[in-house]
């Protein structure tokens, strides 16, 4: 049986961690692959996840390195909300028994003092096929995870708009050179979860000549599935007769790419429309850790807080009439996939990997990029759409055809096997 080991910094934290866990489940369900996960720092108790830092001393080192990187980074970074990773600390994984036993090594998100360029380069010694899923842009930039309009990654970075001391030989250029040296002798195949990510990689100077395979992430379609809307609303104590917009609104101190300002502006535009009865619409928000610093929304708003159980999250999607995601740059956001799987259509900007999932006026509405007016039009279109059941049916069908566990697991298995000597 084919043995695959997945390496990720954390166990389920963030989109990459969730993607890694879900892929692991999908692969093991095929009975063709023995798939295992080993992470740098383990938060949870999932017995299916191993960790490189399984002693008190190693765990202490990992925690200290992660914190130290964040503290040191403050001296180099401007107060902008763009995630950036440095390469000061790292951890060697080449002697771990699960890594040594694997036929294929599958890398995921390996920042926060885990696999820096030096320790990535070490993997070449193992002479094993390596697959790397790019969950964001960091692998092919001089440090940033979200690029916006910056095109410095097309050359050798430097003059980084995120750094305090931006110059041609700044930290971004130095990190670019470290990565370039590490990648020279490291043969790996790239998985881009979206067409947008593939096009980004093709523009990158660090990835010239690399093979890129577009393979989306997957999810648990038996948990995220359609359910009776009224029953879902009753579970969450939501009104039965209102049109409900759901969003994961979260004004993060780190991420400006989530587009919260556009969400607020588009809702205000919607409330000003004569055709809209404000009292018949409710906004439901999950993900906010506190409600003290949020703006005054123009519609009645219910805050559900952070939701850690997938079953409850699925009920949130099912209770809503539409899901709002104003992200300005996203690879293949899980909230979109989860919502569609539950039969709930999407309103989003035409950006990143979202158009890989949302087909305009088929299972949602794709607004013009950074246009609050267009986003507002999408909400009005959704409210007035005559056959909502058709949108719901299309939403679920999209996920089952393109992103279900069996479909995505098989695409990964085909790639793994093609990399083996007898493949």
Image (cartoon, rainbow, N blue to C red):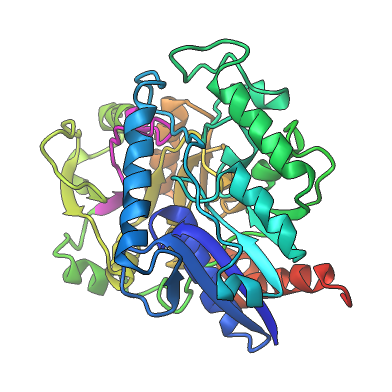
Q: Quadrant of residue 423?
A: bottom right
Q: Is residue 363 visible?
A: yes
Front-most of residues 72 and 166: 72
Question: How far across and how far down the image is residue 132, in percent?
Answer: 66, 55
Residue 70 sits above or below residue 346 on the image: above
Q: Quadrant of residue 416?
A: bottom right
Question: How far across and how far down the image is residue 290, in percent?
Answer: 14, 44
Q: Which residues are magenta?
A: 243-262
> In the drawing, does residue 122 fall left or right of residue 259?
right
Question: How far across and how far down the image is residue 123, in percent?
Answer: 67, 57
Residue placed furthest toward the right: 422
Front-most of residues 307 and 268: 307
The structure residue drawn at horizontal position 29% and vertical position 32%, both measured from the top left corner, is 253
Judged by its main secondary structure, the magenta piece is: loop
Residue placed furthest toward the left: 292
Q: Is residue 387 visible?
A: no
**Which quadrant, please, contains the N terminus?**
bottom right
Question: How far across and how far down the image is residue 286, in percent?
Answer: 25, 52
Q: Count the numbered circles shown.
A: 0
> In the drawing, does residue 401 fall left or right of residue 8?
right
The structure residue drawn at horizontal position 40% and vertical position 36%, both measured from the top left corner, is 258
Q: Quadrant of residue 96?
A: bottom right
> In the drawing, does residue 176 fall left or right of residue 287?
right
Front-most of residues 197 and 97: 97
> In the drawing, does residue 60 fall left or right of residue 390?
left
Residue 401 sits above or below residue 208 on the image: below
The structure residue drawn at horizontal position 58% and vertical position 54%, both measured from the top left corner, is 357
Tell me if residue 296 is in the magenta stretch.
no
């Amino acid at each position: 049986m084919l043995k695959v080991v997945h390496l990720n910094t954390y166990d389920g934290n963030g989109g990459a961690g969730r993607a890694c866990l879900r892929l692991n489940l999908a692969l093991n369900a095929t009975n063709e692959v023995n798939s295992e996960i080993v992470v740098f720092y383990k938060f949870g108790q999932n017995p299916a996840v191993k960790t490189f830092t399984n002693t008190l001393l190693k765990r202490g080192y990992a925690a200290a390195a992660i914190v130290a990187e964040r503290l040191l980074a403050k001296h180099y970074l401007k107060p902008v909300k763009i995630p950036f990773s440095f390469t000061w600390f790292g951890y060697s994984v080449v002697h771990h028994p699960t890594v040594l036993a694997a036929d294929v090594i599958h890398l995921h998100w390996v920042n926060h003092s885990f696999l820096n360029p030096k320790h990535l380069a070490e993997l070449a010694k193992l002479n094993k096929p390596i697959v790397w899923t790019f969950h964001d842009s960091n692998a092919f930039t001089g440090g940033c995870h979200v690029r916006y309009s910056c095109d410095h990654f097309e050359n050798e970075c430097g003059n980084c708009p995120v750094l305090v001391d931006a110059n041609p030989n700044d930290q971004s250029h130095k990190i670019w050179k470290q990565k370039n040296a590490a990648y020279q002798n490291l043969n790996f195949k790239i998985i881009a979860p979206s067409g947008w990510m593939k096009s980004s990689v093709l523009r990158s100077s660090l990835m010239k000549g690399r093979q890129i395979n577009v393979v989306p992430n997957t999810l648990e379609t038996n948990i995220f599935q359609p359910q009776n809307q009224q029953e879902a609303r009753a579970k969450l104590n939501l009104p039965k007769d209102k049109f409900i917009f759901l969003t994961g609104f979260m004004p993060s101190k780190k991420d400006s790419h989530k587009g919260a300002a556009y969400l607020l502006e588009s809702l205000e535009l919607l409330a000003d429309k004569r055709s809209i009865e404000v009292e018949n619409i409710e906004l439901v928000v999950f993900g906010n850790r506190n409600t003290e610093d949020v703006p005054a929304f123009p519609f009645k708003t219910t805050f559900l807080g952070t939701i850690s159980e997938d079953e409850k999250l699925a009920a949130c999607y099912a209770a809503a009439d539409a899901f709002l995601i104003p992200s300005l740059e996203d690879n293949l956001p899980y909230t979109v996939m989860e919502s569609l799987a539950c039969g709930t259509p999407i309103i989003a900007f035409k950006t990143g990997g979202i158009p890989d999932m949302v087909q305009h006026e088929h299972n949602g509405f794709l607004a013009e990029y950074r246009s609050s007016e267009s986003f507002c039009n999408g909400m009005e279109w959704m409210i007035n759409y005559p056959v909502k059941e058709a949108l719901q049916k299309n939403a679920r069908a999209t996920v089952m055809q393109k992103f279900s566990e069996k479909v995505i697991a098989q695409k990964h298995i085909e790639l793994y096997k093609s990399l083996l000597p007898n493949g």
